[in-house]
Each structure stands twice: as structure tokens, then as C-alpha cells.
Amino acid sequence: MFLKTVSTGSIGNCYLLQENNGETLILDCGVPLKDIKKGLDWNIRNVAGCIVTHEHKDHSRSVKDLRNMGIRVIAPYESGEVHSMHFKLGGFDIQAFEVPHNGTWCNGFYIKTPLPDEQRILYMTDLEYCPYSFKKQRINHMLIECNYIADMVDSDLPNFCHKVKGHCELQTTKGIVETNNSTDLRTVILCHMGCKTCDNDRIVAEVQKVAPQAHVCVAEPWKTIELRTDNCPF
């Protein structure tokens, strides 16, 4: 299985989770449709659907365009049923759960791929913290936000309150990874990182300490990462 980053950060967020058979799940669609098509190599036939964390345009920009193309888009914030929303898109089995995002309805996703090669993925972004533990689910891969480091943020910034109440700080990200760590965890991909409030090398090093057996890396536009359960890809 592979994860391709189309875009990440305040400019727009979109990731493609692709099974070995080509079936693809779009995680957020906060970029122009042409960029999503480019990420799919212009082939939409194997798209199982799209899941959207919340309504902010850097995550939901192309919802209407995808639906107009006949692609099923699940955006739990539209229905108000996020607490109990469980659904399938193609072979992907998905559970949505609510996370705090400074008053905006936002959700994370727990995703399972089909047996016999089941993989378990946790996707969380734009959250102040995670109120749940997925320890029992023995997560294989995490795609998780690390938006800022506390000592790199100016408290006089106009968006300071939104940043601290609506995004994940390094220590919080580390806590989430540590809480959900197990011998099955293979990959931690850090996303939605602030360009002026992050030190990527420092963040990767600190997260690596709480999950030493996992491959910890940063999501970058057009970068593809192989997701494996047998061993770390390094």
C-alpha cells in the first residue's frame, strides 16, 4: 500500500491512500480538482471515494467537483452523525470520530483495508488533541498533524488562539503517537506542518523517540511513501 501527498498545510490538504490493486481512497480534497487528477495519474476509475475531515476550504475545496464526477464523498460534518458514523468505500472500512478544532466540527478517521492483508491506518489533522485511544486497534500507520512547536509561536499573532485551540502542537502529537504505539506501528507521517512554526528535523527526532521501531517522516507534496506491515521501509 502507498500514501501519496498531493498537498499539505494551509495552502491545501489532500492525500491518496492506494492499495496494491490500485484502489484509491482520497483523504481530504482541499486542492483544485486538476491537482487531484494529477495525483491519480489522470485515472479516476479506481477511486473508491473521498473522506473529508471538516468544512474549511484547505480540506474541502473540491467536494462539489468530485461529486459532479460521480465520486462518492463522505463529509460527516454535513450530517451531524460523526459520533456513530461507520461506512465502507470500496474495500476500505472506515470509522469517523470527532476531534476538537476550535469550535469547527472536525473528525478523524480510523481506516482498515480488507483481509487477508489488513492494514490499520489512523488519519487525524486540525485537532487540538485526541480524546480517544486506539491502543486496542494496534494501528499500523498514522498520518497525523504536527502544526507547531510551542516555543516557535508568537503569542501576538492574530491567529494565535486558533492555532493553539485548533491545531496539534509537537508535545500533543508525541502524546498521541505514544498512546497508540504498539509493536505493530510501522509508519508515522507528520502532516499540516506550519512553515514558520515547525522545525522538521527536531519534530521527526522527537517523535522517533516515542516510536523507535517506526519509520517517522514528513509529508511533502508529490512524495509517495510505501506503507508496509512486515518491516520498516528503511
Image (tube, rainbow, N blue to C red):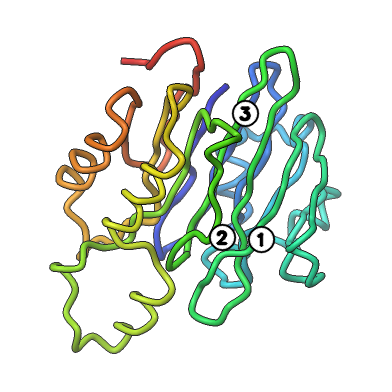
* Residue at which label 1 appears: 62
Mark 3 vs 1, N-terminal side: 3
| Residue lying at 31% horizontally and 49% vertically, measured from the top left | 174
Q: Identity of the amino acid at label 1?
A: Ser
36 with respect to 140 (left or right) = right
* Residue at which label 2 appears: 30
- The correct choice, above or below, for 229 with respect to 194 in the image is above
133 with respect to 224 (left or right) = right
Q: CA distance from mark 2 to mark 3?
A: 18 Å
42 with respect to 114 (left or right) = left
| Residue lying at 74% horizontally and 63% vertically, measured from the top left | 82
Q: 67 or 148, which lies in front?
A: 148
Circle 1 residues within 10 Å: few <14, some 14–19, many ≥20: many
* Whole-percent x, y for residue 233 in the image: 37, 16
Could you tell me which secondary element the residue under label 3 belongs to?
Answer: strand
Q: Identity of the amino acid at label 2?
A: Gly
User: Residue 164, located in which quarter of the rendered image?
Assistant: bottom left
